[in-house]
């Protein structure tokens, strides 16, 4: 079950219907999971901002680099032009170029893109090389199209799926996780959705409870080979009308979730956040007769509720990636255990970290 | 008492002797507190990396801007040249230029600086205008020299002192706070010290316990005029030998402490971190006959323990700023209450947030 | 006379009426020149985006730091919030804080700002310490109000005035210079105006002619103490409707003018560019009942003509700062000679750098 | 012939032996040129900092993004870690992922890299889609190994070779160009080498002479479809001992060359600079028993001569890319003419842009 299914309620804001990035209207997610033989434990996850040709209808977007020890692709163009023109694809470190090629196949082949000669493929990655034979580069370009073809709105598969198939996080099996938040009507009623590919370390705390220490599984403990490095990709979607500048501010807040879950964004962790808006009036047509684009942007002083929503949703998405993962054996017989749910719940109970929805919640006038 | 005096032990690393930025060898701190009449509630805090003429012996330094809604001065030169050539001074928003002038008075007057015609004064600020008559700009240049003259190593006054005199944080009275961490010998044995000027908002959690919600005092609650904006200045010192590039990475980790204490770095919060090294071999003489500077830098893959230390020390420095603050009445009769210690301790007890030093700690081989 | 008065026509685009930053509708410029005794050779220059209370009607703005060895103030807030809320003031390095205080005096005193408790004063500076007794810090806060009070549209005084009184550039007397460009109607017909405070070095070329080498006055020549350091402040105004993101792109292009005039932005040169738009629909009211701001932005692919305009206007503004400067004697008897106009014109003639308006010009369909 | 063969001498500093990036000790360059049928006009160019396993002996490096409308890969890790761990490969826009895969093949296969599971492939690109059937993605991974295998020091092929096979610049055929500069012994005697892949537009000037206008071939002229967009990759090598921070400052100066040659870095031009040092004492072993790395760095105030060298070498490398290119017919019968050398030389003569080595040169004491 997901974190919330066990009574683990994070924060003061309500979730969307699916408590997923797909609560943001139009956003869809697809996975291609590669599990074969002893050592292929990897995959591809794609996030589509909308269902049209995104090259022809770009969305405003921004990037925040928490720790740049990673191989994400397509970042500088997002920063310069303030938009995203492909779906975002996540995969393993050494397959990033192949996945970029898969995105190119898809984009160049879309009806309407026959004359396109320049596409900024956006690919994120984390390193699943402990469980996966990463040097084998087992992802193929058509795995991207498979993920794209099966992308859907609604519930999102989490844990050991897609790009999260072989990852590990905070001492346990990591993977894909997602969550969402809805702002109160007086703050605009916007939705924020987050999806993470978790693969990083630290001293795990869950809703403030020191789970990593209680379970004797944390960075710098005496016993065993805890690995703090890894990486985390964080994708943030919202239907709030935002400029690239304000989306960058949202992206930066997702980084704070590391502090919330007990991580310090280790040297070897490539931690990247990409945020985009799906508010239709912010879309940027690839070509236009109008040289000037009228576009809505939330005033700066309206941003704080969204910042809170990003922090909460990112934190919960990380928890979901842990709760929904399962034990996995892979490359060279390596085994990574999932978070032990029963013992974890006991710890959460001990620290009263469950059912915090009985505490006061957001209820602004 | 400070957080730790009440059994509030944050993190897995031990503190230095004073649990203060002054545990970093050579670092000193001075305050000038301005309390007068009904409405002067402000001051100046200075941090000196070493006791010599810092213009003549610059230290490597870096800046991270979490949220740039602030008026900090001197940042671009630190970024470009990778060093700090004055003490760092903190004050209120509208007094920043006056304090910069005070720093200039001091620097230009130092023996050896007779021919200096360019000085990069580094000044941080937060807005204390709720309790302080900030428009009155009551800080004078000589308040800076007073703070510098009385700067000392050893214990650091916290709470309503110096630049923290009139600030508020997380729904309560904020102020100056400090803390430190010592790395295990196997990780270099370095010290990291942090000093904060806390003046920001959020949904306060302390060692994971939802104190803000329990006390009905948090951002976006139903009742009352909670103010999330404010700002936070974070100063980080270490004796680890670090380049400006790696110091920037340290500075960035201090931002994660917002997530740990339940803040989201609101729109109106000017959140800046400045990190410097006091390892003597990293000092940069203003003039030198040697065109090439041999300088030590920790290898990238040795940085993670320092990142953890920065996160822990920043989090605890924020707690100390709250625990050590006292109720204050000021400008226009505004009153800000300090964190109610007794009730807070009860909450911390309820959530088992106290005495976590009985849990496993850092003990790497 | 100005460069153009001598037939020195730079680039392919036409100028505005005044060939000045004041060709941008609503922009005004004021100077306060401080010349007294043997060694006071400094001043203040202010640029106002419009004539209303700019705190209440902010303008979108952006900063580009070419070389951050400088003490400019207010940059991080421009970057974060994407706007400018005070006039821009220029002065000498050590007077920057005093000028910031002068700006605060002005802003806090404006009708409508009675409750303002936070203002981001934007101050640029270059170091005039060779001709000016800079350590004396002779600028007073009311010099700022004097400059503001006398600010006007129309022709702009150049050379040894205001913040350019004591500067030197490219081996000669520098100072204030300005220029403008008008885009063809098919490219929007927008105006770009630039004002520079020139105080930097290099190997001067003018419209491509190697003037510095011909005059035996350039960086790294055999004879004499050529000083490459200094700094350059570049202010860019336009009436094109632009977001902060696109304004940053404009600001970055002004840096290319260094390459055009033979400079390499030396280590000691603090080179900063600040760009803003005065298109009224881009203005950002300080308070508003509307949480969403509809704002026009030129499409990315419409930007190139503006980039060219910025480059040309910056280059010509630098030439104007040299042509309009006069010999000056100052601090400690130091003398800086102006560009020798007659010899320079001979050189320009020799290299056919004059009257290039007979060559093909911009004439897009 | 190259620019200098015709008497076109740019700047005041002398060149290295080959006037190429390969004058920097240890640096080698390889090309794979793909010319086939009517429409394959592309290739790969690689630059190797040294001849050892660069993953095991990384070099300090930095990136500057002039205009981020491009798909360069590997930038964020260079920025974060301050080093380069693969050769740099250049190619066309849509082949960047394939070339990244080619780099991975090579790196993973190097002796000593058997256990490497993470490699930051650095790939730059420009768009050759006018002459080349770019959508066909004709570059194969083994083209990278071919380029690497044939890489050599000494003279570098320029013009229509490797990644420059199908590019165009400033209205003419562009391509690969290179140049170098040597500092005077009193400034350290260091070498700076630059290699460009030119593919951008503007209003061409050569050594200050308005060649584009004289030849009726420039941006915004009346006639014809001048294309300003394109991109430029700039690779900078030096044997000066520099930190990543100072290498970034070098990289930024290469951007000034756009101003020198009459370009404004158009909206559609992805302009990236990557700088690295080959001073052996700056090399960073992938693994080390020593946690602290002693490393030499030129003092900040020694950087200016290198900045000048970067500007001059970049400018001349661009000229070489034009002078060494040849007419090309390609995709869809498109033809791009090379710079007409005879007419250009006449223009350069007219403006006395040739033989400027008779003017005073750098000769510092």
Image: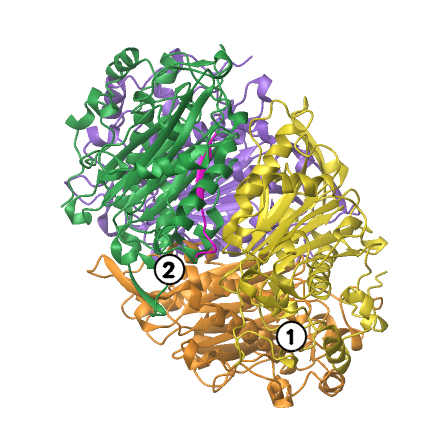
Chain colours: A yellow, B orange, C purple, D green
Which-is-in-front pick, marks 2 and 1?
A: 2
Callout 1: SS: loop
Task: Estimate the x, y position of residue A62 in percent, counting from the top left.
Answer: 61, 46
**For residue C127, above or below residue B28:** above
Describe the element under mark 2 as helix, strand or loop: loop
From mark 2 to mark 1, how far is it between C-alphas?
Answer: 45 Å
**Where C97 sits versus A141, above or below?**
below
Residue A287 versus residue C38: which sits nearer the camera?
Answer: A287
Subunit under mark 1: B
From the viewer's perspective, tell me whether residue D46 is left or right of residue B350: left
State whether residue B146 appears in this view: no
Front residue of C46/C276: it is: C276
Residue D123 within the magenta-colored segment of the rendering:
yes
Q: Quadrant of residue B293?
A: bottom left
Whether residue D196 sits left or right of residue B326 in the image: it is: left
Q: Is residue D28 visible?
A: yes
Q: Is residue C112 above or below residue D146?
A: below
Label ID, residue C294:
none
Residue toward you, B162 or C41: B162
Query: What residue range appears in magenta?
Result: D116-126
Q: Which residue is mark 2?
A: D286
Question: Based on the displayed image, in which of its 4 quarters is residue D21 positioned?
Answer: top left
Q: How many numbered badges does the structure rendering display?
A: 2
Residue C237: which quarter of the image? top right
Query: Which residue bears the numbered disc 1?
Result: B174
Please give the chain letter of the residue carrying mark 2.
D
Answer yes or no: are tags 2 and 1 on the same subunit: no
Mark 1: few/some/many CA within 10 Å (<14, 14-19, 20+): many
Q: Which x, y percent locates residue C8?
A: 35, 21
Q: Position of residue A125 (x, y in %)?
A: 57, 51
Say few, some or many: other residues with alpha carbon within 10 Å of mark 2 (under 14 / 14 to 19 / 20 or more).
few
Residue contact at pointers 2 and 1, CB within 8 angstroms: no
């Amino acid at each position: 079950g997901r974190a919330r299914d066990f009574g683990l309620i994070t924060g003061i804001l309500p979730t969307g219907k699916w408590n997923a990035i797909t609560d943001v209207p139009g956003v869809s997610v697809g996975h291609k999971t590669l599990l074969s033989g002893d050592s292929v434990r990897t995959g591809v996850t794609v996030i589509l901002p909308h269902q049209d040709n995104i090259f022809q209808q770009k969305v405003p977007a921004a990037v925040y680099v928490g720790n740049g020890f990673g191989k994400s692709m397509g970042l500088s163009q997002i920063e310069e032009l303030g938009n995203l023109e492909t779906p975002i694809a996540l995969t393993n470190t050494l397959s990033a170029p192949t996945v970029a090629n898969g995105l190119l196949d898809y984009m160049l082949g879309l009806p309407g893109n026959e004359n396109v000669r320049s596409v900024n493929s956006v690919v994120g990655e984390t390193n699943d090389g402990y469980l996966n034979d990463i040097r084998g580069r087992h992802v193929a370009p058509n795995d991207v199209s498979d993920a794209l073809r099966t992308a859907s709105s609604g519930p999102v598969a989490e844990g050991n799926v897609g790009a999260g198939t072989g990852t590990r996080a905070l001492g346990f099996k990591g993977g894909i996780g997602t969550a969402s938040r809805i702002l109160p009507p007086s703050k605009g009623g916007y939705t924020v959705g987050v999806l993470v590919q978790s693969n990083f370390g630290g001293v795990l705390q869950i809703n403030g409870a020191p789970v990593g220490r209680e379970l004797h599984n944390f960075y710098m403990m005496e016993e065993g080979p805890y690995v703090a490095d890894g990486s985390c990709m964080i994708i943030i979607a919202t239907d709030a009308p935002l400029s690239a500048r304000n989306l960058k501010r949202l992206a930066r807040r997702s980084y704070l979730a590391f502090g919330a879950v007990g991580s310090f964004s280790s040297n070897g962790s490539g931690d990247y956040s990409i945020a985009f808006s799906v508010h239709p009036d912010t879309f940027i047509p690839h070509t236009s007769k109008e040289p000037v684009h009228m576009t809505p942007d939330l005033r700066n002083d309206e941003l704080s509720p969204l910042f809170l929503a990003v922090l909460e949703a990112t934190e919960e998405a990380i928890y979901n990636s842990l709760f929904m993962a399962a034990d996995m054996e892979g490359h060279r017989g390596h085994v990574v255990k999932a978070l032990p749910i029963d013992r974890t719940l006991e710890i959460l109970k001990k620290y009263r970290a469950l059912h915090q929805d009985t505490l006061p919640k957001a209820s602004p006038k």
